Amino acid sequence: MSLSEAQVRHVARLARLALTDEEIDGLGAQLDDILSYAEKVGQVATVDVAPTSHPYPLANVAHVDEARPSLPREDALANAPRVEGNRFHVPRIVGEEQ
């Protein structure tokens, strides 16, 4: 499969890339290699392969939740730009007009 310069420019335009003539020449060969490889991958015999989400059988891979001490509130608020009471103070954005 060989891509023409017009096809490479078209792909670059679709990707919104501003490329120089030298880049167009170099990328043409690279795109050709990529498409050839994708074509090769498409030829793999997959008739006997069932669709999977993971190559290994997994069951309940979530970790067990354990209660443990958390960061003290003073430490959590120590580097906050603004604190109000025992909370982070953030600007109100709901209901504001822009």
Image (spheres, helix red, strand yellow):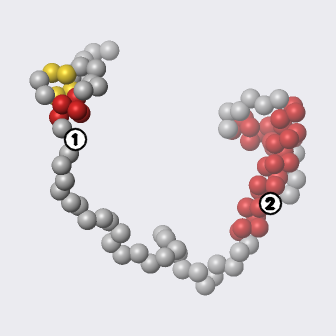
Image quadrant where residue 67 sits = bottom left
Q: Would you say residue 6 is visible in this rendering?
A: no
Quadrant placement of the N terminus: bottom right
The count of marks equals 2
**Label 2 near label 1: C-beta < 8 Å?**
no
Q: Point out which mark residue 97 bears.
A: none
In the image, residue 47 lies at what x, y percent?
Answer: 63, 82
Image quadrant where residue 36 sits = bottom right
Residue at image position (13%, 28%) is 86
* Figure check: 69 above or below 39: above
Label 2 residue SS: helix
Q: Would you say residue 50 is visible in this rendering?
A: yes
Q: Which residue is mark 2?
A: 36
* Figure check: 67 above or below 9: below
Q: Which residue is mark 1?
A: 71
Q: Name the one closer to the observer, 9 or 59.
A: 59
Q: Name the one closer to the observer, 79 or 18.
A: 79
In the image, residue 15 lies at what x, y percent?
Answer: 67, 38
* Figure check: 30 above or below 22: below
Image quadrant where residue 76 sits = top left
Residue at image position (71%, 75%) is 44
Residue 28 appears left or right of 96: right
Circle 2: residue type: Ser
Residue at image position (17%, 34%) is 73
Disc 1 from disc 2: Cα separation: 54 Å
Circle 1: residue type: Leu
Residue 63 appears left or right of 32: left
